[in-house]
Image (cartoon, grey):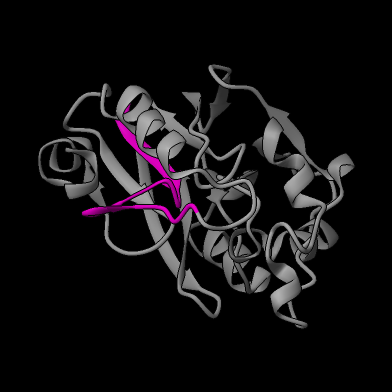
Amino acid sequence: MIKVYVAVLGPVGTNCYILINEESGEGAIVDAADSADRLLSAVEKKGAKLTKLLLTHAHWDHIGAVNDIIDKLPKLPIYIGEHDVPLMENAAANCSAWLAEYPGTVSRDKVNALKDGEELEVLGETVRIIEVPGHTAGGICFYFQDSEILFCGDTLFEGSIGRSDLPTGNEEQLITNIKEKLLVLPEATKVYPGHGMATTIGEEKHGNYFLQ
């Protein structure tokens, strides 16, 4: 069973998730906004070894600590959606150029690009990659099928959806993709967003104003 812990980091309060499989002693991180030392320490304090870093999309407030993690763990496998790789390398497009202290670009040779529908083994579970363009061109969600948990970055929020006014965003595309790709998941699926509180697919399917 995977346990999920959250660290809210960075200037805009990004949810960085620490995932632990206590049986295997393996850990993973979803999104790395800031404070690499805090994230790595959180995994270590749980008695786990970090095995993967999963990135939902390439905006600066989700990749801000990636380079520092690479410096400390150069062989750590890092994953991001294939269509967000160009965004990851472009400071203007991923909005890191807004803040001088956040250079916020990561070289493509440091990551593994994931395709829509691809499956990835994480902490002993099969994770399906669901690409949901709209917040960014290549934003992805990580769906842990056995645990019925979804890490969706800034695609879907409790009672809301991600903004679409930033580079490569598209509101119509975002809403359509959420309806067609996420709301078809089991309603009990726990949804862990990039900001704010966790929710479920059922709650958003029936109560999210933007999706009615």
Does the image show residue 58? yes
Q: Position of residue 195 (x, y in %)?
A: 39, 62
Q: Nearer the viewer, residue 133 or 144?
A: 133
Q: Is residue 98 above or below residue 19?
A: below
Q: Is residue 146 above or below residue 32?
A: above
Q: Position of residue 65 (x, y in %)?
A: 69, 65
Task: Tell me if 84 is positioned left or right of 178 in this view.
Answer: right
Q: Position of residue 3 (x, y in %)?
A: 36, 47
Quarter of the picture containing the N terminus is top left
Taking the spot 18% from the left edge, 47% from the top edge, the residue there is 208
Taking the spot 52% from the left edge, 65% from the top edge, the residue there is 42
Does the image show residue 1? no
Task: Tell me if 5 is positioned left or right of 92 in this view.
Answer: left
* Residue span colored magenta: 145-164
Quarter of the picture containing the C terminus is top left
Taking the spot 30% from the left edge, 29% from the top edge, the residue there is 179
Taking the spot 51% from the left edge, 47% from the top edge, the residue there is 135
* In magenta segment, residue 137: no
